[in-house]
Amino acid sequence: MQVAVCDFFPYNSQEILSVKTGTEEQSGWILNGFKAVVSWPEDVVMEKSVQEEELDRIRTKLSGYSAQGQRDLMITPGSYGEGFLADKLNLNLEDLIRCGDYIGETIDMARECGITSLLLTGALGTIAMLGDGILNTHLRQEADGMETLADCVLLAGGDADLSRGILHCNTADDVVEILWVTAFLHPAVEQLMRRVDRVLKSRAGAQMKIEALAFSNRYGVLGKTPGAEMLLMLHRKWM
């Protein structure tokens, strides 16, 4: 079966199996129980096999750890900062799984595999997108977390000019550079991590602990959810 994006179609990875280039209008497709007339988007290709292979890789890793009795794990979207995590925070990267853009699905699969706890580590920009409820970042390529960070600055007591300045930043490190010389860096990140905490715990459910840590190779640890330090202790390398 093939499906394509239309105005009322919930665009998420669980429903989309493949989208192929074309302009021919098709009728009679069933999307979440709706009969629809669909126009294929031009210049778009999303192959089911690529996504499924990545999710299968993550599921295999989670199942393997669970079978070995290792049920306290770390996840990260990519390789960014692994040297920082190992060298500066002294974390054991053997407990780390790269989840790519599939943070939400990874949380779901971890719960199904009986994982006890997950510690999500990521760059500030990725963590900021989580604060906006974006758990699968491959579906929201236009988002960069800047609006969320700007909102958090306002919630922390910053003025509108400072918040607007955040919107013009290209990277999360640029945001930190601006806020570093103000009194609002830590209060703004604290607001962000509160949001992230709610989003992650809502997705994980009551049976699995989940916490998050935001960092930058340049600026170090920027923020943690309230219970992150407890999970960090589980992954420290001890002499």
Image (cartoon, grey):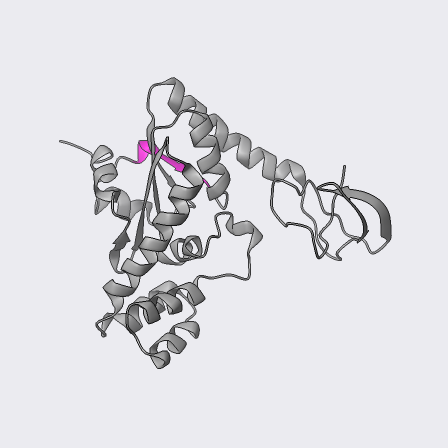
Regarding residue 97, the answer to whether it shows in the image is: yes
Question: Considering only vertical position in the picture, is 138 above or below 188?
Answer: above
Is residue 87 shown left or right of residue 239? right
Query: Residue 61 or 33: which is nearer the viewer?
Result: 33
Query: Residue 61 or 154: which is nearer the viewer?
Result: 154
Quadrant placement of the N terminus: top right
* Number of numbered discs visible in the structure rendering: 0
Residue 238 found in image quarter: top left
Query: Residue 141 or 112: which is nearer the viewer?
Result: 112
Q: What residue span does the magenta drawing correspond to? A: 93-99
Is residue 65 shown left or right of residue 23? left
Is residue 102 shown left or right of residue 154? right
Residue 65 found in image quarter: top left
Across and down, in percent, residue 166 comes to: 38, 72
Across and down, in percent, residue 53 comes to: 58, 33
Query: Residue 69 or 153: which is nearer the viewer?
Result: 153
Question: Considering only vertical position in the picture, is 231 above or below 177?
Answer: above
Report the residue that reaches farthest toward the left.
239
Query: Is 133 part of what is drawn in magenta?
Result: no
Across and down, in percent, residue 225 comes to: 28, 49
Report the residue that reaches farthest toward the bottom.
161
Regarding residue 80, the answer to whether it shows in the image is: no
Across and down, in percent, residue 43 comes to: 73, 56
Q: Which residue is drawn at 20% across and 34% down?
A: 237
Q: Residue at x 36, y 32 (%)?
A: 208
Query: Is 96 part of what is drawn in magenta?
Result: yes
Q: Residue at x 65, y 41 (%)?
A: 15
Quadrant placement of the C terminus: top left
